[in-house]
Image (tube, rainbow, N blue to C red):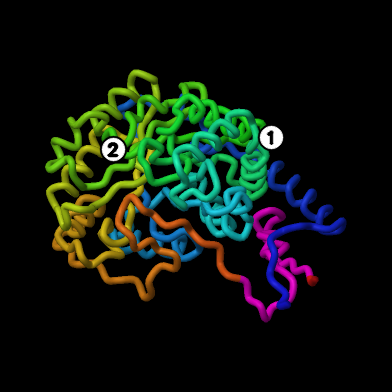
Amino acid sequence: MPVQRRFINFGIGATALCLLVGGAVLADHDTTDTQAGKGATQRAPEQDRTTAIGAYLDYGPQGVQRMAELSRWLGGTELRVGHSYLPGDLWENIEGRPGFLAAWAAWRKADEDRMFVLNTPMLERNEERVSDDEVRGLLRAGAYGQFDEHFRRLAERLVLLGVPDTVIVLGWEMNGTTYTHRCGPDPVAWKAYWNRIVTAMRSVPGQEFRFDFAPSRGRDAVPWTECYPGDDVVDIIGMDSYDQPPARTFDEQVNEPYGLQKQVDFAAEHGKPISFPEWGLFRNGDNPEYMRRMLEWIERHKPVYQTITDYCPHGVWQCADNPHSSQVFREMLSGLPDATTPPAPDADPSGTPTAPKPDKPTPTVPAPDVNEPGWCVTLPLSDWFGQWLSDRELCVRD
């Protein structure tokens, strides 16, 4: 049987290293007070807030690399938001394997003004079309605390990696039918389960997480207001909004039941800022009018952050199918005139979803190298101990 790479399961010596590193991370974090780590209740006045701009470009390290490339295409516009998704296939992946998160953690820590946004599934088998009856049972089990430990582990890993101020987009698009973590089969249990998760993650020392409640625009399977779990466990009220029917025009997207205006009004009623974790083109094709109106809406209402979904059919940089919308996006965010069709990246993003919304495939953990014995993980020692100690790859053989 070939030897496979495993994720961290330290022995005695490595445990000591882990404790040493963890203490260094926490000590360093305690001396830093960044704006990104402050709670959403500490809001700046409406006119003083600026929206952090980003894009979803890939789940892993290629997404980090493409942040700089997209910024150059935008004439140097600063991209302050890095956005990724945890795999929803297995609990061990929802817990946030360190190798999966390390590149994003390093990107976030390189500049105190940056923000890391992490979509986090509430249940495993999240895209396996689990029946309503089974979803109902899983939500009730979660509400009774059966899955608390998975989210404590995730919180501990984020703190250890030095990103305790991560924005957690928990159970996104819960008002739909796609995900196992959907709300419709039992809204009461769903809300209780959300509360359990937030409580478990906030129990971890050093955390400064913000929790983003982000339904899809419109009513979908259930009104998203019926899923709202309470002001004490929500920091941001987001919305995933794509250019698609039943709304035929942008005005209809604003005014439809549970649409963009409802998000603004509901957030104001609850004293919360808004966000747009996912938005972009879709069934209405290359639509520069939508692109212009959506960016104007974002500028007017000043969400905490916005991250366009940049892959086909939604995107404007990695998707050459939308040249007119691409030009509008580039001109409005960079001020560069006569924008041209964006060049395609050198290679397709690994794991980039290709299916239409809302069927976003689960991110995958890289396959192990069967020819390499044991397992390895790179420790960013230079971040923790200073320039006198370079990064090291820790390996353990079977």
Secondary structure state at the residue bearing disc 2: loop
Closer to us: 321 or 355: 355
Q: Disc 1 to disc 2, how far (Cα)?
A: 35 Å
Q: Which residue, given by chain and number where applicable, does mark 1 sit on?
A: 205
The magenta region covers 368-396
* Quadrant, the N terminus: bottom right
Q: Taking the image as drawn, is residue 51 in sight?
A: no
Q: Taking the image as drawn, is residue 250 in sight?
A: yes
Q: In x, y percent, where is residue 214?
A: 39, 37
Identify the residue at horizontal 41%, vertical 49% (top origin): 80
Q: Which residue, given by chain and number where applicable, does mark 2 sit on?
A: 217
Q: Is residue 300 left or right of residue 121?
A: left
- Does residue 374 show up magenta in the picture? yes
- Does residue 383 show up magenta in the picture? yes
Whether pointer 1 and pointer 2 mark residues with C-beta atoms closer than 8 Å, the reply is: no
Q: Amino acid at mark 1?
A: Pro
Secondary structure state at the residue bearing disc 1: loop
Q: Residues within 10 Å of mark 2 (few under 14, many from 20)?
A: many
